[in-house]
Amino acid sequence: MRKTIFSLLCLMAAIGAQAQSDTLSIGYCNGKVNTESSHKKNGKCWNNCALWLSKEALNSYEGNAIVGVKAGLVNVLNTDTLVVWVRKKKDGPNIAEAKVVRKTGTGNVAKGWNKLLFDQPLTLDTNQEGYYVGYSLRQRATVEAVSTVQPARIGTSFLQQGNGEWQDISSEGVLSIEALVAGSNMPDYDLGVASATIVPRPSVSTTALSLSVGVHNYGTKAAKGYTIALKAADVPTQTVHIAQSLPAMADTTLSLIVDPGVATHAQTQWTVELTASDGATDCNASNNTTVPYYTYVRNVLLEEFTTEKCSNCPTAAANLHTLLGDERFSANVMAVAHHVGYYTDWLTLSGEEELLRFYDNGNDTYAPAAMANRKAYFENNAGKSVPVFLPTDYELLEKVTATELQQSTNAMISVDLQLANNNSVVNVCVGGVCNELYNQASPRVTVYLVENDIKAQAQEGASGTYYQQHVTRAVNATWGEPVEWKDGAFSYYCSFTIDPAWNTKNMEVVAFVGNYDADDVSNCAIENCAKATLPVGGSTAVKGINAADDVQTVARYTLSGAVAPRGYKGVTIIKLSDGSAAKQIIK
């Protein structure tokens, strides 16, 4: 019998305060409210936040009632009205609500927790199918009030601001919202699986997976131990026992490396199952299993703003070089350099100055600067959320990059290259696959032709001979071109003409798929990226097609993105069992 091995990477139990015996706070934030918010909408508008509590999460409270809601806010400056509610649909009517309006003297909207009770409690019965529990906060002017905290719970947290659409923000954390449940029939023991995700880990082995499981104690008494099992047909069951106690109403996230020893893929029908092991009777078996979401490894694109007129840019470039040489980052981090920000120089790409919009403060731009996957982690002098930061601080550069790498992603891409016309043209094929959680509103694919080791003409702040790295020589479009996903896949083609003065031995293609918002730079994040080095004639290798018996083709798509029918001949994008994608020509 094959021995099952687990590597327990991280076991973090976030301990929530014990609720009163007759009232429980039901949610996933463990009583926490963040001190910062990454969500901001300018001007007057409503902020609507919804936490999904499934039927399985509420089953053990049948016969009791939701008597109110706790809403956690980061800031309340410029706000006047808070309405907490329960709904059957995110945009449906309130079936229970309570309101506080600052200007009428009926109460106050407070920073931190706001506890509001309903006039008419909502009884939980056997017919309920789950509820959205949330709040609506009206702002008179710009405010950052929405609180999300870790650990994340897929499919639980949703946000709508102003006239915008509802967005699933679960990947960044859970909303600070808790339903208040009261009654005389509270459960003693009830452990449940809140959510689970699977990410392929080819860096560990061709069959290794990273499993993240959220466990919640819905009961009024502590659970002394439990067991997690990962199951699928024709795959050895993986089990691990957790001996650590989980207090009442507390939440924990388990991060495990699992290696079933056989090839699996996005279509493998996994089930995560939880069993209590302390002898207590679990009163609600319906929340003990879940189907995990299959996600992908996130790569990070670092974009550098630099010019030869910038005397501090060599320091930033040295930091970037050090980071890219670190084995923790070298396999999954790539870079491109935009020669704008502090004037321009002879390496500035046409149209590149448009990217200065990411500073979002008019003409107040600078270099050196950098972005990590265009994520708006920072605030500029005008108080706007932006992705631009100073890479002269190596610790900050390292922290931002590591933060991005720790997150999984819902899409992945691959890049395949072919040189043509006596190596004067490079043809590029970008293939992508995504899961059902992928939800970027306006996805675009951007492709850069990049050259390294270009001798500088007159770099300020450098002594001796200086070489420019990651220089953008060409781009398909400054803000990328629209992507059309079909059946969870897309393919995209473009070509670049190579200047005879460029050194093809030092060139690569970097591509990414990300969102585009002409009005909001904080909504232009990159979902994932990939790169390929220019081949010396011919095409780049297609990873994994014939490399190993345990890497299998699990899906084929035509260039239009549709599933390739049986017997289809021509260029196809194939999805492989290790989570990668590649191009293949079938004759």
Image: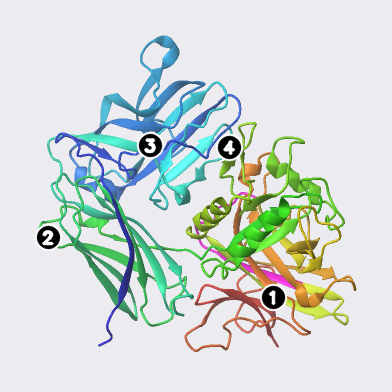
The numbered mark, 1 or 3, whose residue comes first in the sequence reads 3
Amino acid type at circle 1 is Asp
Q: Which residue is mark 4?
A: 164
Distance, label 1 to label 3, CA atoms, is 45 Å
Q: Which residue in the rendered view is the most extreme toward the right? A: 500
Q: Quadrant of residue 243?
A: bottom left
Q: Which residue is mark 2?
A: 278
Per the image, is 44 magenta?
Answer: no
**Mark 1 near mark 2, Cβ–Cβ under 8 Å?**
no
Residue at 48%, 75% (x, y): give it.
203
The numbered mark, 1 or 2, whose residue comes first in the sequence reads 2
Q: Quadrant of residue 462?
A: bottom right
Does any portion of residue 254 appear in the rendered image?
yes
Q: Which residues are magenta?
A: 428-442
Q: Nearer the viewer, mark 4 or mark 1?
A: 1
Amino acid type at circle 3 is Val
